Amino acid sequence: MKLSYNKLFDILKQKNITKTELRENIKISTATLAKLSKNEPVAMKVIEDICNFLNCQPGDIMEMEKEVDRTSLLYQLREEKKIKLKGGIYHQTQVKLAYNSNHMEGSKLTEDQTRYIYETNTIGLEKESVNIDDIIEAVNHFQCFDYILDCADDILTENIIKKIHSILKSNTSDSRLEWFKVGDYKQRPNMVGDSKTTPPNKVKKEMQKLLFEYQQKDKIGFDDIIEFHYYFEKIHPFQDGNGRVGRLIMFKECLKYNIVPFIIDERYKLYYYRGLKEFENEHGYLRDTCLSAQDVYTEMLEYFKE
């Protein structure tokens, strides 16, 4: 953990107060101001004077930030995203996650077509007929992945989950249906195969309960993430897109807790669905499917470390 005064300089910017004006008003030296700028410790008297000047509390201007782990996968993905590196682990994850997750839900795009859309931002489907929603949702999925990288450090909340759904379903034909409610919980009952899910009027309460119980755990591990996924899919909070949102959540939480993430291969979707269906009686089916997917992703990570 390291000390940060970034919040102080955000407040100064909002109030149109320059660093020089701050220094002159609270009578501090340029050296002390430099320490604040470099996030170095200063005397408590300085903090008190700043708070009196800005009419705020110490917590409003300073915080302890978690130091960046430059060896983590999350750091690597964010760096490759920032520099728009082609062919790296970020690039491969974008394509494989979008293709497999969308294909499991009925998309007819091939992996090559998904890769082409990602790499060229064009369609290039020659004479082949493809559903426009499949294309839109592939592009949206790329944006969803970028979003979970941005918020990977954050505690999982309803707002984050709804935002993922909003990005995924924006501009699709579903989004033009008034009752569909993109980025919000379902208004009509739905089922998974022949299994009933949580009724619309109980979804919010069940989601809040699920998140509360998840956040109360002392330490989140692989099995906790899998269990959360099962109960999320059992609730099935959205009208459509639950599977893809759920799998993106698992990826995000793995990154947050420095657990090797995984991509469920669409070829093994029957094992994955069986795992969800029988989870209450036998955790092993879903767990083993996810562990196998984790092994595949680990191999890809090892390749990029060589």
Image (tube, helix red, strand yellow):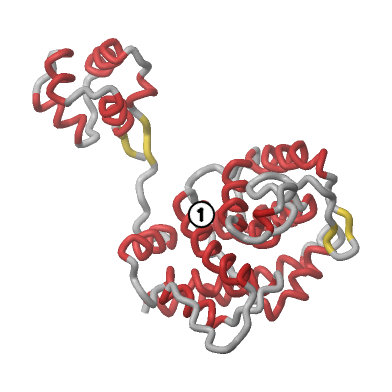
Question: Where residue 190 appears, x then y in whole percent?
Answer: 83, 55
Nearest the viewer among 233 and 129 is: 129
Residue pushed farthest bottom?
127
Q: Name the residue under label 1.
A: 148
Badge 1 crowding class, 10 Å Cα cut-off, few under 14, some 14 to 19, many 20 or more, is many
Amino acid type of the residue that numbered disc 1 sits on in the rendered structure = Ile
Nearest the viewer among 154 and 66 is: 154
Residue pushed farthest left?
30
Residue at (63% x, 47% y) in the render: 183
Give above or below for 57 relative to 143.
above
Give above or below for 5 relative to 198.
above
Residue at (34% x, 67% y) in the render: 84
Quadrant for residue 98, please give it: bottom right
Question: Where residue 225 appears, x then y in whole percent?
Answer: 65, 55
Residue at (43% x, 58% y) in the render: 74
In what quadrant of the picture does the N terminus appear? top left
In what quadrant of the picture does the C terminus appear? bottom left
Secondary element at image label 1: helix
Is 283 on the left-hand or right-hand side of 34? right
Is 236 on the left-hand or right-hand side of 182? right
